[in-house]
Image (cartoon, rainbow, N blue to C red):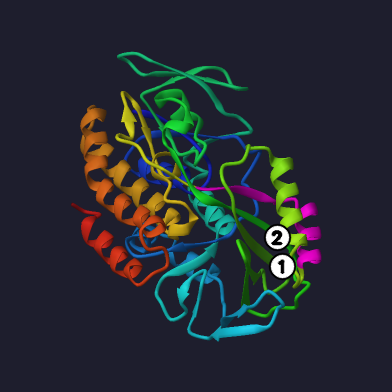
């Protein structure tokens, strides 16, 4: 039985593990976190990614867990409503769409529950070295004993360790898009009921949505900035300071960001690479082709990429080079079109057309 190590326990990695397991591979997933990571924004499952979720047997559960927004308000800097909609929200698009908006942590949990009986999970660990020969890849871990796998897949996000070890420093591939995104949870101190609010003041702004039966809020705060050091405490300080400068609810949001246990902040950036495989190592999702949250397509790219990569490996038994080549041939048009949503016309009228073109560019069964 062929063995595969997947680095990353978010969405892309476990989704790949699900498909590889069905194709008869023995899969191990290593995740730096000590367990499933809570928090995070709502994510969108769109287009062909819905087909992938259905084939995984998760569509009914995902639909049951979807957000239930009635609409949104857009506010000026003083909190005065300047626009409202009961037809669409900025986070999910049209409310009558078949697309699914679901909390990231819920989707992660669903996929983990679907795979945990058949896939080995190593939590609280990470890859530290890769040494490939003609028989496989010897992998060193921070905690576990070294092991050899037939293949290694990096599905470990924007700051992928596997990518760094196999392809080189992150700065070769990361392209900063001029802003940062912070996401954190807090109590529903605004008493929102299935209703989002959005505010922008100069080069900063946020969206707030109620979750968990309107008992909690998820705050997505963005600010323009050049590249900053990856220092969690410093980033929290910057977010807190900039939130506090806002006139409407800035003080309470800053206090929430300061104490949020699920605080997250990272650059809006894309990963662009000439190839996503080297020898027996391949990249999946954000690790290989992060489109940035500005595209709204990161989750869909991860789900579709996992399905395609597993299928290509199953169709080329014993020939990983051919499988990886086919994977790139099928995914690159889809990736290019979706990355363009964040760079060429973000949120504009061309976005929907580009998504349709991306659907046509990829055939799940081709």
Residue 259, position as x, y percentages in the image: 80, 53
Q: Is residue 1 visible?
A: no
Secondary structure state at the residue bearing disc 1: strand
Q: Is residue 258 visible?
A: yes
Q: Is residue 287 left or right of residue 188?
A: left
- Residue 4 drawn above or below residue 114: above
In 3D space, how far apart are the residues under numbered discs 1 and 2 (Cα atoms)? 7 Å
Secondary structure state at the residue bearing disc 2: strand
Q: Would you say the residues marked 1 and 2 are in contact, meaning their CB atoms lie under 8 Å apart?
A: yes
Residue at 56% in and 71% down: 67
Residue 244, position as x, y percentages in the image: 77, 61
Quarter holding residue 144: top right
Quarter holding residue 183: bottom right
Q: Is residue 97 left or right of residue 254?
A: left
Of residues 5 and 284, the one nearer the viewer is 284
Q: Earlier in the sequence, mark 1 or mark 2?
A: 2
Residue carrying label 1: 216
Residue at 39% in and 64% down: 46
* Residues rendered magenta in the picture: 250-268
Residue carrying label 2: 185
Q: Is residue 231 left or right of residue 276?
A: right
- Label 2 Cα crowd, 10 Å radius (few <14 / some 14-19 / many 20+): many
């Amino acid at each position: 039985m062929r063995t595969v190590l997947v680095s990353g326990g978010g969405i892309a990695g476990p989704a790949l593990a699900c498909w590889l397991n069905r194709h008869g591979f023995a899969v191990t997933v290593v995740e730096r976190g000590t367990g499933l990571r809570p928090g995070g924004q709502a994510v969108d499952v769109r287009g062909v990614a819905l087909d992938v979720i259905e084939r995984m047997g998760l569509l009914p559960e995902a639909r049951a867990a979807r957000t239930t927004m009635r609409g949104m308000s857009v506010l000026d800097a003083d909190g005065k409503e300047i626009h409202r909609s009961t037809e669409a929200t900025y986070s999910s698009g049209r409310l009558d769409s078949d697309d699914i908006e679901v909390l990231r942590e819920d989707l992660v949990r669903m996929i983990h529950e679907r795979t945990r009986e058949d896939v080995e999970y190593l939590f609280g660990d990470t890859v530290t070295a890769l040494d490939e020969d003609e028989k496989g890849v010897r992998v060193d871990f921070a905690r576990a004993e070294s092991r050899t796998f037939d293949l290694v897949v990096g599905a470990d996000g924007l700051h992928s360790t596997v990518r760094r070890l196999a392809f080189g420093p992150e700065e070769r591939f990361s392209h900063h898009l001029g802003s940062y995104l912070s996401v954190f949870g807090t109590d529903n101190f605004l008493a929102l009921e299935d209703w989002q609010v959005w505010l922008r003041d100069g080069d900063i702004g946020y969206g707030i949505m109620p979750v968990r039966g309107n008992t909690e809020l998820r705050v997505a705060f963005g600010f323009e900035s050049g590249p900053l050091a990856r220092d969690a405490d410093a980033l929290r300080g910057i977010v807190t300071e900039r939130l506090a400068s806002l006139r409407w609810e800035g003080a309470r949001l800053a206090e929430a960001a300061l104490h949020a246990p699920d605080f997250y902040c990272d650059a809006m950036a894309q990963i662009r690479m000439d190839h996503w495989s080297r020898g027996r190592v391949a990249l999946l999702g954000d690790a290989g082709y992060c489109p940035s949250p500005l595209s709204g397509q990161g989750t869909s790219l991860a789900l579709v990429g996992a399905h395609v990569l597993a299928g290509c490996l199953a169709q080329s038994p014993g020939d990983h080079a051919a499988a990886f080549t086919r994977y790139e041939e099928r995914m690159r048009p889809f990736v290019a079109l979706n990355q363009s949503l964040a760079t060429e016309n973000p949120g504009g009228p061309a976005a929907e057309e580009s998504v349709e073109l991306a659907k046509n560019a990829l055939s799940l069964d081709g």
